[in-house]
Image (spheres, rainbow, N blue to C red):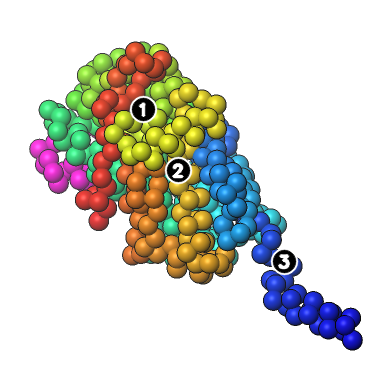
Amino acid sequence: MRRRVFLVALLATALLLPVGSDAQKPIKVGFPMILSGPGALFGEPALKGAQMFVEELNAKGGVLGRKIELHPRDTKGNADEAVRVSRELILKENVDFLVGTLTSAEGPAVSVVAKENKIVFIAPIPKTDQLTAPDKLHPYVFRVASTTTIEGRTAAELIAGWNVKRVATISPDYAYGQDVTRAFVEYMKKIKPGVEIVDQQWPKLGEADYTPFINAQMAKKPEAVFSSLWGGHFVTFAKQAKPLGYFDAIKYNFFGAGEAASPESTKSMGADYPVGIWGNSYDAFYWQEGPAAHKEYTARLSKYLKDEYPSSWAIQGYIGMQALTEAIKKAGSIESDKVSKALLGLTIETPHGKLTLRAKDHQANRAQIYGKTVRDPKYPFAIMKPAVYVDPTKYMD
């Protein structure tokens, strides 16, 4: 009789537990990201930031009592490869969520995969407006990065304050370059109609020889240039442009969007960096005006990376994972439909302060740090000084 009672109790307990003891299984997160080629300059540290967040969270017990398990895959900066590895992560690795992609070609492509599989996808880096445009928006895609509209308009407002009338652009010929340049030009014409766009150059993404584009642009004699060449692409361009006198010709009135002033870019170029240009960055370890949480985050990141001057891109991987886990906690579930609803209007406390994902377009009010690059005796590479965090609110709609 006792044996029968024991077996009945055991069976009842088993029925109360999730099938296969899911409550004990790790929550799997696929992380498709550029980890090779020129884009790895930004992709590798973004992964490191995500890994640091996961290690810190798991040390505290994870979320809903479950550990997070990160599954990174190299997209190689190719949209087709990003789609392939994302499908593989979903169908073979059985990941519960996707966080990742870097380029504005990869993000929208993986968004389609997320929609097809009804799995939440958080994009921590792609900026193209197309990712969350009304005709592309669906319940499972969210972005904690800035956008091409925010970045282009912010740059236009800054350049509008310069004493220049002849402006040129040079941007990679794909979604990000096209979208951010259009946002820049349209806003510039609105706020300073006297400015003339005298030249626009469109090298392909991954161009190896920028010399023809540089010479063609210099022939038009612009007084200032807006560029959205990023990562290793910007590094290659700048190294070729500097000895040709390109930056001297425009008196360093050059704005490098695409994080051309990030520590990754300035550190990798060293003495070759065109100090005096303007640029932006998602983060800067030397940002003195940041909140206390940023100083604490920077100290932890420096220790984690074993780098006195830690990466700026780590914060995007970190915030992407932070948004996902806060939504899981709020939903009390890992079901994508429930987590998706929890992300709508979600506000999280990031190392840069409060960040909110708007319900109407799944877009975070994510700003960046902007400034003019200078030499500082404290560091062996250029930094922005002053480094100013520009509120994106007025540029978002």
Residue 56: where, in percent of width, then height?
A: 56, 44
Q: Nearer the viewer, residue 360 or 305?
A: 305
Residue 350: where, in percent of width, then height?
A: 40, 47
Residue at numbered disc 3: 21
Q: Secondary structure at mark 1?
A: loop
Question: Disc 1 versus disc 3: distance between alpha carbons?
Answer: 46 Å
Residue at numbered disc 2: 316
Looking at the image, residue 166 sits to the left or right of residue 7; the answer is left
**Mark 3 residue type:** Ser
Q: Residue 14 — which label?
A: none
Is residue 198 in the magenta section?
yes
Q: Residue furthest left?
A: 194
Mark before the other along the chain sequence, 3 or 2: 3
Residue at numbered disc 1: 286
Magenta part of the chain: 185-201
317 over 379 or under it: above or below: below
**Mark 1 residue type:** Tyr
Residue 341: where, in percent of width, then height?
A: 45, 68
Quarter occupied by residue 214? top left
Q: Nearer the viewer, residue 20 or 96?
A: 20
Mark before the other along the chain sequence, 1 or 3: 3
Total numbered labels: 3
Mark before the other along the chain sequence, 1 or 2: 1
